[in-house]
Amino acid sequence: MEQTFEMIAKTFQGLEEVLAAELTALGADNIEMGRRMVSFTGDKEMLYRANFCLRTALRILKPIKHFTAADADAVYEAVKAIRWEDYLDPAKSFAVDATVFSEEFRHSKFVSYRVKDAIADYFRERTGKRPSVSITNPDVLLNIHIAQTDCTLSLDSSGESLHRRGYRQEAVEAPLNEVLAAGMILLTGWKGECDLIDPMCGSGTIPIEAALIARNIAPGVFRQGYAFENWPDFDADLLERIYNDDSQEREFAHKIYGYDNSIKANAIAQRNVKAAGVGRDIVLKVQPFQQFEQPQEKSLIITNPPYGERISSTDLLGLYQMIGERLKHAFTGNTAWVLSYRDECFDQIGLKPSARIPLQNGGLDCEFRKYEIFDGKYKEFREGGEALDKPRQAEHRERRGEARDSRDRRPSAPRRPFRADEKERRRPERPERPERDRRPRSGESYPERKRREAKEQSHKPTTDTTTPHETTD
């Protein structure tokens, strides 16, 4: 029987419950929620599947030692006492990422330096050689987490953050993180039961993540690789089996619509959608929100408008007034979810939310609000047997607070007072690194494999007179 061990899945604040539900569906054991993390146990296959399948995890850590330390020298001694040949070959490179919430340890970089020194000295004293340190592309990535004097040293099994799916070809200014986008969709409960609309879709992150959820396509199919592939016990056959298992994928009978008023954003979204292989499910169009019309089918809106923090808007409050007007007049009988930052912006929508979920986006304390747009007067809506859900902001915070890991406390960025007459400033964003073409072990990308399978199916003898659908994505 395969040995089981402890693992930690890191996520954004506000997505802990969604991640715990994902782990439950995946079959993980001993699931416990903390602050921006969920711990669980499982075997090597669970480690691989967690990296490959989880939509709301940023990285998967495998703790190798828990200890207490009052200073950096104590950290050095505890790390040096580990049997490092079980985890690292001196011919390979490594790096250390430190996360520190402690009065005793003021500088996370100094902590990481002492961990590196301990590992280098361990190998030098035993073999006369030492592994090299690589900041950009290490073979083995380590993580040390310190909360006051409690320390956890872990192997990072993911390497590059799991939000980097691999399908993004290009991005607009301040793109929505893929993990946050998937978490927002899962928080609504949508899994493909109706049409989904993002009327301000930018580079297409919400539509693409929605398509992957609707068809239950694992987000890992686009990844170049994982850090655990450099571990001494890596099982290539196991990862190949997980990659090629598409038995849980399903059909999607509806459509996902992505609109944006920018021709450039639409072109970028088109390229990203094609790279993800979900073009048959997503309809993209250059269209400002002002021209949004009542959809013919039952629909759900999920959108992330500008906040005026990282993306400028000449009339931010007017933008949110327009959003409220369009929802009230062109989305009756449906539900909309809006992620934003400022109460002043939400107030301009002019609708009472039935749910408020605190989320963090780019270090900002945001809220994800649900609006149920009923047709007619609210009194008539209630008389018809309907009722808005009670706002569950306090309940959501209370549930998360009960499971919160009190050791991990980092102050959030304070909200800046808003002045309606101020000129919004653009903040330059670091350009996202271009994704490499996915060339998995089987030698073909996920969209290529799907096209090949469709062609093979079309050449099989059949009594059906209809022409098999072939993906043109």
Image (tube, rainbow, N blue to C red):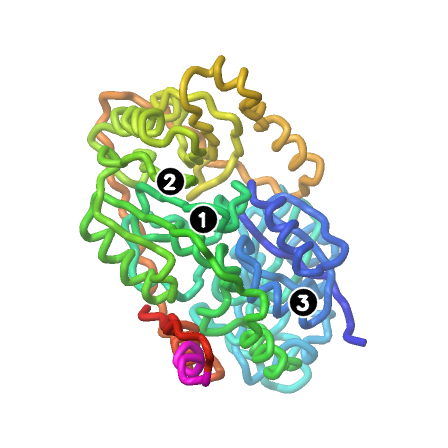
- Give, as a single range, the part of the protein colored magenta: 453-461
Residue underneath mark 3? 46
Q: Main secondary structure of the magenta part?
A: helix
Query: Which of the image's four quarters has the C terminus?
Result: bottom left
In this view, the residue farthest toward the right is: 1
Q: Residues within 10 Å of mark 3 (few under 14, many from 20)?
A: many
Tell which of 158 and 97 is nearer to you.
158
Name the residue located 44 percent from the left edge and 52 percent from the top edge.
210
Determine the image quadrant of residue 269.
bottom left
Name the residue located 32 percent from the left edge and 26 percent from the top edge.
329
Residue 268 in the magenta stretch? The answer is no
Name the residue located 71 percent from the left edge and 35 percent from the top edge.
402
Q: Are marks 2 and 1 in contact (CB under 8 Å)?
A: yes
Residue 320 in view in this figure: no
Q: Residues within 10 Å of mark 1 (few under 14, many from 20)?
A: many
Q: Earlier in the sequence, mark 2 or mark 1?
A: 1
x, y percentage for residue 382? 53, 17
How far apart are the two marked residues, 2 and 3, measured between alpha carbons? 33 Å
Residue underneath mark 2? 304
Q: Residues within 10 Å of mark 2 (few under 14, many from 20)?
A: many
Determine the image quadrant of residue 44.
bottom right
Q: Is residue 302 left or right of residue 76?
A: left
Residue underneath mark 1? 181
Name the residue located 33 percent from the left edge and 59 percent from the top edge.
432
Mark 1 is on which residue type? Ala
Q: Is residue 406 left or right of residue 338?
A: right
